[in-house]
Image (cartoon, coloured by chain):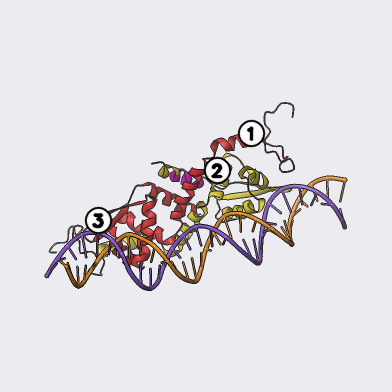
Chain colours: A red, B yellow, C orange, D purple
Amino acid sequence: MPNGISTQTEIECCDTHEIHRDLLQKVNAAMPDEEEISDLSDLFKVFGDSTRLKILFVLFEEEVCVCDLAELLNMTQSAISHQLKVLKQSKLVGSRREGKSVFYSLADDHVRSIIAQGREHIEE
Amino acid sequence: MPNGISTQTEIECCDTHEIHRDLLQKVNAAMPDEEEISDLSDLFKVFGDSTRLKILFVLFEEEVCVCDLAELLNMTQSAISHQLKVLKQSKLVGSRREGKSVFYSLADDHVRSIIAQGREHIEE
DNA sequence: TGTTCATATGAATGATTGTTCATATATTCA
DNA sequence: TGAATATATGAACAATCATTCATATGAACA
């Protein structure tokens, strides 16, 4: 390899247990730190459940209270409440008390675009 | 309710176990069917794991083979291989054999934007 | 204050999932 | 063909998680 202009094509892959330095450097530079990766996977875990997605789709339309959600999705008030807690902890939804009821709503619009991108990917 | 122009402000929420018709209709119209919701949550589940996210971040930079991934992420070849299978089933990555090695790469750019949106949400 | 209605929460349970270990498949080379 | 290397895969185990059930908190109203 006299002048190392493009070393991309060489396939000395796994026998030498030294990864190509360029790659190692590039990856380390681009890879978020462990904590951000962990936060990110936690965020996507929240989207990875049918019940929570349904709740979000309802909130796309309108702010609603817990018992309406339970009724709309045909689920226990308790189950809904547990999931709302998860959604709230990830700051995907916010809540507001009004008398005996608590109304939930979307926190911001990242939610919409993340889900929109997901739907695009599925439809192929 | 003589003329029903805006019924939004009435808060007869949960005592009457009949959900407001407008809401029910609106939600039913916007809610994807059960199968799409399920596919969508399955897709997000894939993003909801640190190892798989790290693999994707590597693939953002370059096409790599399995053993390089294992080395880069300091994990077992088996663990990586199992996760690559998941990523491939969701069509987030593609693979290409070259001799003994198999090279993996990003399947499309939805992956980038989904993850980018996720990162934006976290940084608040 | 006591009752009722709406929501929250802790413990328990069944289901799902990521990793490990052992092993199988596939390709190259002698 | 046989050995060596790279990858894939099935079973098992520990950990995580969504729901249920019972109960607690909190607000309104008599």
Q: Residue at x 64, y 43 (%)?
A: B64
Q: Is residue B19 above or below residue B46?
A: below
The alpha-carbon separation of the residues under discs 2 and 3 comes to 41 Å
Please name which of the two marks, 2 or 3, marks the residue nearer to the observer. 3
Q: Amino acid at mark 1?
A: Asp
Q: Residues within 10 Å of mark 2 (few under 14, many from 20)?
A: many
Secondary element under disc 1, as helix, strand or loop, is helix
Q: Is residue A95 above or below residue B74?
A: below
| Residue under numbered circle 3 | A97
Estimate the x, y position of residue A119 in percent, counting from the top left.
Answer: 45, 54
Task: Tell me which chain the residue with mark 1 is part of.
Answer: A
Q: Give the quadrant of the C terminus of chain B.
A: top left
The alpha-carbon separation of the residues under discs 1 and 3 comes to 55 Å
Q: Which residues are magenta?
A: B107-118
Estimate the x, y position of residue B41 in percent, counting from the top left.
Answer: 46, 58
| Residue under numbered circle 2 | B57
User: Does B104 sit left or right of B42 as displayed?
Assistant: right
Secondary element under disc 3, as helix, strand or loop, is strand
Task: Tell me which chain the residue with mark 3 is part of.
Answer: A
Q: Is residue B113 magenta?
A: yes
**How would you classify the magenta stretch by its main secondary structure?**
helix
User: Does D1 sit left or right of A56 as displayed?
Assistant: right
Residue at mark 2 shares a chain with residue at mark 3: no
